[in-house]
Amino acid sequence: MELDPNTLDASQRYRLMISGIVPRPIAFVSTINQEGVANLAPFSFFTGIGASPMRLLFCPANQSDGTEKDTLRNAKPVSEGGTGQFVVNVATEAYAREVAAAAEPLAYGESEFNLTGLSMAASQVVKPPRLAESPVAFECETSQVIRLGSNEPGGSNIVMGRVVHIFVRDDLIDGKYHVDPAGLAAIGRMGGRGYCRTSDRFEMPRGRSALAPE
Ligand SMILES: Cc1cc2nc3c(=O)[nH]c(=O)nc-3n(C[C@H](O)[C@H](O)[C@H](O)COP(=O)(O)O)c2cc1C
Protein backbone atom coordinates (compact mmCIF):
# COMPACT_ATOMS: atom_id res chain seq x y z
CA MET A 1 0.00 0.00 0.00
CA GLU A 2 1.36 3.42 -0.91
CA LEU A 3 0.10 6.24 1.29
CA ASP A 4 0.17 10.00 0.83
CA PRO A 5 0.01 11.58 4.30
CA ASN A 6 -1.97 14.50 2.85
CA THR A 7 -4.88 12.17 2.08
CA LEU A 8 -5.00 10.79 5.64
CA ASP A 9 -6.65 12.37 8.66
CA ALA A 10 -4.63 13.28 11.75
CA SER A 11 -5.61 10.16 13.70
CA GLN A 12 -4.65 7.87 10.79
CA ARG A 13 -1.28 9.60 10.49
CA TYR A 14 -0.77 9.35 14.25
CA ARG A 15 -1.59 5.61 14.31
CA LEU A 16 0.81 4.96 11.43
CA MET A 17 3.57 6.82 13.24
CA ILE A 18 3.18 5.21 16.64
CA SER A 19 2.90 1.69 15.22
CA GLY A 20 5.49 2.12 12.44
CA ILE A 21 8.22 3.84 14.47
CA VAL A 22 8.88 1.18 17.08
CA PRO A 23 10.08 0.46 19.67
CA ARG A 24 10.35 3.91 21.19
CA PRO A 25 12.20 4.69 24.43
CA ILE A 26 10.08 6.49 26.98
CA ALA A 27 11.19 9.70 28.70
CA PHE A 28 9.40 9.83 32.05
CA VAL A 29 9.70 13.59 32.49
CA SER A 30 9.54 15.34 35.86
CA THR A 31 9.05 19.11 36.06
CA ILE A 32 7.78 21.65 38.58
CA ASN A 33 5.41 24.56 38.13
CA GLN A 34 6.01 28.10 39.42
CA GLU A 35 4.52 27.09 42.80
CA GLY A 36 6.93 24.15 43.06
CA VAL A 37 4.31 21.41 42.49
CA ALA A 38 5.92 18.43 40.76
CA ASN A 39 4.56 16.95 37.53
CA LEU A 40 5.43 13.60 35.94
CA ALA A 41 4.47 12.44 32.43
CA PRO A 42 5.68 9.92 29.81
CA PHE A 43 6.83 10.96 26.31
CA SER A 44 7.91 8.40 23.72
CA PHE A 45 8.67 10.88 20.97
CA PHE A 46 12.05 11.11 22.63
CA THR A 47 15.68 10.69 21.69
CA GLY A 48 19.22 11.80 22.40
CA ILE A 49 20.61 14.53 20.16
CA GLY A 50 24.34 14.27 20.81
CA ALA A 51 27.00 13.82 23.44
CA SER A 52 29.11 16.96 22.86
CA PRO A 53 27.44 18.87 24.33
CA MET A 54 25.15 16.29 25.90
CA ARG A 55 21.66 17.10 24.66
CA LEU A 56 18.35 15.29 24.28
CA LEU A 57 14.86 16.11 23.09
CA PHE A 58 11.25 15.09 23.60
CA CYS A 59 8.09 16.18 21.85
CA PRO A 60 5.01 17.19 23.86
CA ALA A 61 2.16 17.75 21.39
CA ASN A 62 -0.47 20.41 22.12
CA GLN A 63 -3.66 19.28 23.83
CA SER A 64 -6.80 18.81 21.73
CA ASP A 65 -7.82 22.42 22.54
CA GLY A 66 -4.45 23.71 21.28
CA THR A 67 -3.05 24.53 24.73
CA GLU A 68 0.28 23.30 26.09
CA LYS A 69 0.61 20.11 28.12
CA ASP A 70 1.70 20.74 31.71
CA THR A 71 5.20 19.39 31.04
CA LEU A 72 5.79 21.94 28.27
CA ARG A 73 4.25 24.72 30.35
CA ASN A 74 6.69 23.91 33.16
CA ALA A 75 9.80 23.06 31.12
CA LYS A 76 9.77 25.95 28.63
CA PRO A 77 12.45 28.60 29.11
CA VAL A 78 12.07 31.22 31.86
CA SER A 79 11.83 33.88 29.11
CA GLU A 80 8.64 32.11 27.93
CA GLY A 81 7.11 31.77 31.41
CA GLY A 82 8.38 28.31 32.36
CA THR A 83 11.07 27.15 34.78
CA GLY A 84 13.57 26.19 32.06
CA GLN A 85 14.33 22.82 33.65
CA PHE A 86 13.24 19.18 33.52
CA VAL A 87 14.47 15.70 34.38
CA VAL A 88 14.26 12.71 32.02
CA ASN A 89 13.83 9.52 34.04
CA VAL A 90 14.06 6.16 32.28
CA ALA A 91 10.85 4.11 32.12
CA THR A 92 11.42 0.58 33.44
CA GLU A 93 9.51 -2.66 34.02
CA ALA A 94 9.50 -2.05 37.79
CA TYR A 95 7.04 0.85 37.42
CA ALA A 96 5.55 0.21 33.97
CA ARG A 97 1.96 0.56 35.25
CA GLU A 98 2.78 3.89 36.85
CA VAL A 99 4.30 5.13 33.56
CA ALA A 100 1.01 4.46 31.77
CA ALA A 101 -1.01 5.87 34.69
CA ALA A 102 0.95 9.14 34.66
CA ALA A 103 -0.54 9.91 31.24
CA GLU A 104 -3.81 10.62 33.06
CA PRO A 105 -4.77 14.22 32.23
CA LEU A 106 -4.81 15.94 35.62
CA ALA A 107 -5.69 19.57 36.29
CA TYR A 108 -2.66 21.89 36.17
CA GLY A 109 -1.04 21.84 39.61
CA GLU A 110 -2.19 18.28 40.48
CA SER A 111 0.76 15.93 40.76
CA GLU A 112 1.10 12.54 39.04
CA PHE A 113 3.50 11.63 41.88
CA ASN A 114 0.41 11.56 44.14
CA LEU A 115 -1.67 9.67 41.56
CA THR A 116 0.94 6.94 41.01
CA GLY A 117 2.49 6.71 44.48
CA LEU A 118 5.95 7.09 42.97
CA SER A 119 8.55 9.00 45.00
CA MET A 120 10.68 12.06 44.42
CA ALA A 121 14.39 12.41 45.11
CA ALA A 122 16.18 15.76 45.12
CA SER A 123 18.06 16.51 41.92
CA GLN A 124 21.65 17.72 42.22
CA VAL A 125 21.59 20.72 39.85
CA VAL A 126 18.01 21.46 38.74
CA LYS A 127 14.95 22.21 40.86
CA PRO A 128 12.54 19.54 39.52
CA PRO A 129 13.00 16.30 41.47
CA ARG A 130 14.14 13.12 39.80
CA LEU A 131 12.06 9.98 40.15
CA ALA A 132 13.55 8.11 43.14
CA GLU A 133 12.67 4.72 41.63
CA SER A 134 14.43 5.47 38.32
CA PRO A 135 17.87 3.83 37.97
CA VAL A 136 18.96 6.49 35.45
CA ALA A 137 17.99 10.16 35.31
CA PHE A 138 19.19 13.07 33.18
CA GLU A 139 18.85 16.52 34.74
CA CYS A 140 18.33 19.09 31.98
CA GLU A 141 18.29 22.83 31.39
CA THR A 142 15.92 23.65 28.54
CA SER A 143 17.92 25.09 25.68
CA GLN A 144 15.11 25.67 23.19
CA VAL A 145 11.49 24.91 22.38
CA ILE A 146 10.62 24.67 18.71
CA ARG A 147 6.91 25.12 18.08
CA LEU A 148 5.74 23.56 14.82
CA GLY A 149 2.03 24.19 15.39
CA SER A 150 1.49 26.96 17.93
CA ASN A 151 -2.04 26.86 19.39
CA GLU A 152 -3.12 24.16 16.92
CA PRO A 153 -4.87 21.07 18.34
CA GLY A 154 -2.26 18.32 18.48
CA GLY A 155 0.41 20.68 17.11
CA SER A 156 3.96 19.44 17.58
CA ASN A 157 6.60 20.92 19.85
CA ILE A 158 10.22 19.93 20.33
CA VAL A 159 11.80 20.53 23.73
CA MET A 160 15.58 20.40 23.60
CA GLY A 161 17.55 20.12 26.80
CA ARG A 162 21.19 20.28 27.79
CA VAL A 163 22.09 17.57 30.29
CA VAL A 164 23.67 19.21 33.34
CA HIS A 165 23.80 16.19 35.66
CA ILE A 166 23.34 12.44 35.37
CA PHE A 167 22.24 9.96 38.02
CA VAL A 168 22.98 6.25 37.51
CA ARG A 169 22.36 3.68 40.24
CA ASP A 170 25.79 2.47 41.40
CA ASP A 171 25.19 -1.21 40.66
CA LEU A 172 24.24 -0.53 37.02
CA ILE A 173 27.29 1.29 35.68
CA ASP A 174 30.58 -0.31 34.62
CA GLY A 175 34.06 1.22 34.41
CA LYS A 176 33.44 2.30 30.81
CA TYR A 177 30.21 4.14 31.68
CA HIS A 178 27.96 1.52 30.09
CA VAL A 179 24.63 1.04 31.81
CA ASP A 180 23.77 -2.64 32.35
CA PRO A 181 20.72 -3.26 30.13
CA ALA A 182 19.52 -6.30 32.10
CA GLY A 183 19.56 -4.44 35.39
CA LEU A 184 18.00 -1.36 33.82
CA ALA A 185 15.09 -3.34 32.33
CA ALA A 186 13.89 -0.38 30.28
CA ILE A 187 10.52 -0.62 28.56
CA GLY A 188 9.59 0.77 25.17
CA ARG A 189 6.38 1.96 23.58
CA MET A 190 4.82 0.19 20.61
CA GLY A 191 1.59 1.28 18.89
CA GLY A 192 -1.73 1.69 20.70
CA ARG A 193 -1.65 0.08 24.13
CA GLY A 194 1.47 -1.95 23.29
CA TYR A 195 4.76 -1.87 25.17
CA CYS A 196 7.91 -4.00 24.95
CA ARG A 197 10.63 -5.22 27.29
CA THR A 198 14.34 -5.01 26.50
CA SER A 199 15.14 -8.50 27.81
CA ASP A 200 15.56 -10.11 24.33
CA ARG A 201 18.84 -8.66 23.06
CA PHE A 202 21.57 -9.74 20.62
CA GLU A 203 25.01 -8.45 19.67
CA MET A 204 26.71 -7.79 16.34
CA PRO A 205 30.01 -6.29 15.29
CA ARG A 206 29.82 -3.01 13.45
CA GLY A 207 30.45 -2.61 9.72
CA ARG A 208 31.02 -5.31 7.08
CA SER A 209 32.05 -7.95 9.62
CA ALA A 210 28.41 -7.96 10.77
CA LEU A 211 27.62 -9.78 7.47
CA ALA A 212 29.96 -12.72 8.21
CA PRO A 213 28.32 -15.80 9.73
CA GLU A 214 29.39 -16.41 13.36
C1 LIG B 1 4.01 5.62 27.11
C2 LIG B 1 3.42 6.95 26.72
C3 LIG B 1 4.11 7.77 25.84
C4 LIG B 1 3.60 9.03 25.49
N1 LIG B 1 4.30 9.81 24.62
C5 LIG B 1 3.85 11.05 24.30
C6 LIG B 1 4.59 11.91 23.42
O1 LIG B 1 5.67 11.56 22.93
N2 LIG B 1 4.09 13.14 23.18
C7 LIG B 1 2.92 13.57 23.74
O2 LIG B 1 2.53 14.70 23.51
N3 LIG B 1 2.20 12.79 24.58
C8 LIG B 1 2.64 11.54 24.88
N4 LIG B 1 1.93 10.75 25.74
C9 LIG B 1 0.74 11.32 26.39
C10 LIG B 1 1.12 12.20 27.59
O3 LIG B 1 1.89 11.46 28.54
C11 LIG B 1 -0.14 12.74 28.26
O4 LIG B 1 -0.77 13.63 27.38
C12 LIG B 1 0.11 13.37 29.60
O5 LIG B 1 -1.14 13.64 30.20
C13 LIG B 1 0.85 14.68 29.51
O6 LIG B 1 1.02 15.11 30.83
P1 LIG B 1 1.23 16.62 31.26
O7 LIG B 1 0.03 17.42 30.83
O8 LIG B 1 1.36 16.51 32.76
O9 LIG B 1 2.48 17.11 30.60
C14 LIG B 1 2.38 9.47 26.04
C15 LIG B 1 1.67 8.63 26.92
C16 LIG B 1 2.18 7.38 27.24
C17 LIG B 1 1.43 6.49 28.17
Image: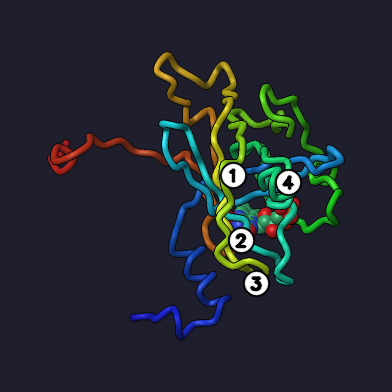
- Which badge, 1 or 3, is on the more N-terminal residue? 1
- Mark with earlier residue (2, 4): 4
Rounded to the nearest whole Å, what is the CA distance between mark 1 and mark 3? 24 Å
Pinpoint residue 202: horizontal percent, then vertical percent.
34, 38
Tag nearer the camera, 1 or 4: 4
Q: Which mark is residue 152?
A: 3
**Front label number (1 vs 3):** 3
Q: Are marks 1 and 4 in contact (CB under 8 Å)?
A: no
Residue occupying the point 39% across, 39% down: 201
Q: Nearer the viewer, residue 4 or 62?
A: 62
Above or below: residue 28 compared with residue 183: below
Classed neighbour count for the residue bearing mark 1: other residues with Cα under 10 Å, few (<14), some (14–19), many (≥20):
many
Q: Residue at x 82, y 56 (%)?
A: 106
Q: Which residue is mark 4?
A: 82
Among all residues in the image, which is located at the extreme bottom? Answer: 7
The residue beneath circle 2 is: 193
Mark 2 residue CB less than 8 A from any atom of ligand 1: no
Instruction: Give the label on residue 27, or none.
Output: 1
